[in-house]
Amino acid sequence: MTLLALLQTLLLSGCQASLFHALNATTGDSGLSVQPDIVFDPELHLALDIYAPRGAHDLPVVVFFHGGSWQDGERQWYRWMGEALARHGLVVAIPDYRKYPQVRMAGFMSDASHAVAWVHAHAADHGGDPRALFLMGHSAGAHIAALLATDGHWLESVGLRPDRLAGFIGLAGPYDFLPLTEPAYVGMFGASPQAQARSQPVNFVDGDEPPMLLLQGMTDRYVAPKNACALASRMRAHGEPVEVHLYPGMGHVRLLLSFSHPLRNSSTALDATLRFIHEHEADHQAGSEVSGSVAKGADACDRVVSARPSQ
């Protein structure tokens, strides 16, 4: 069985751990520096992995939060993602965070905040530019990153602010998903309307957010496209730069896998991500106001983009 056929089989089976392990077996680019198991919270034994081009200097930095319904997943499963982004000139950190039922939302959001603060403080040691710091995530990881980018109190607790971020990139993220009825979600986010409202990134957009790129598959059975559209609408209402790319025929995991080398040609998501980062890193490094980006994608939720990269 070819690698592509194996990946397709694992994708259909829904066994994400095996799928990601198969992708990790394809990694090992000698042109990259991989530094695993760097502890950023000794008390809680939380670590992160860093991927960068060898000889990196002042490159944009991406902190990528993995998905797993806030209950599953391990940073080590995403080596393939770290290497995929690093091959394109980025310094990438993939951190641990505690999960439910070990902790509720306050626990995993605190972990995420401390991971971002650590990366900001140590980016230059690994060839990155802390002035060009982007948050990125898939599914539950996109929700975590989006809350960091919108609800200022999380980053403020570690001495940062959302407007110090160069951008946020969300892949199939739940940003506006009330009401919560499943017991696990009520357990992690709370039962009261007030507590549940605090879990929604759309409720915190107030004009101090970084630019956003929201990528979403239109056939996603787990996170509805309305989540990306709702967050984009709230950003535009505050005059903030946001793009939405909706991919026809793309499901929840397939969108993420389109960043991998074997499935690279199934989506333009990686191209869009790299362009977004390079458009916004210079603005943020210079401390200039981002302009001209609000209208781009203003009607994105009424149209779709090509799923495949141009040849």
Image (cartoon, helix red, strand yellow):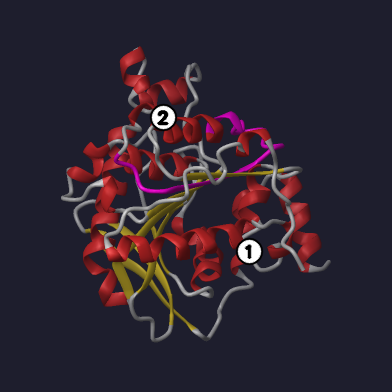
Q: Which segment is the magenta one?
A: 208-227
> What main secondary structure does the magenta stretch of the protein show?
loop
Instruction: Give the SS element for disc 2.
Output: helix
For badge 2, the amino acid type reads Val
Q: Is residue 309 above or below residue 292?
A: below
The image shows a total of numbered marks equal to 2
Task: Tell me the residue that label 2 is attached to.
Answer: 202
Split into 4 quadrants, where in the image is the N terminus?
bottom right
Q: On the image, which quarter does residue 194 sit in?
A: top left
185 in magenta: no
Lower position in the chain sequence, tag 2 or tag 1? 2
Task: Tell me the residue that label 1 is attached to.
Answer: 260
Which residue is pictured at 47% across the width and 40% down the height?
140
In this view, the residue in front, 167 or 96, is 167
Residue furthest front in the image? 292
Q: Residues within 10 Å of mark 2 (few under 14, many from 20)?
A: many
Q: Is residue 131 visible?
A: no
Which residue is pictured at 33% across the width and 76% down the height?
58
Q: Residues within 10 Å of mark 1 (few under 14, many from 20)?
A: many
Split into 4 quadrants, where in the image is the C terminus?
bottom right
Q: Is residue 217 visible?
A: yes
Which residue is pictured at 26% across the width and 74% down the height?
124
Q: On the image, which quarter does residue 185 sit in?
A: top left
Instruction: Give the SS element for disc 1.
Output: loop
Q: Is residue 192 above or below residue 34?
A: above
Residue 211: where, in percent of width, then height? 41, 48
Residue 301: where, in percent of width, then height? 62, 35
Q: Is residue 168 above or below residue 227?
A: below
Give the side of residue 16 with respect to residue 48, left or right: right
Residue 82: where, in percent of width, then height? 49, 66
CA separation, marks 2 and 1?
Answer: 29 Å
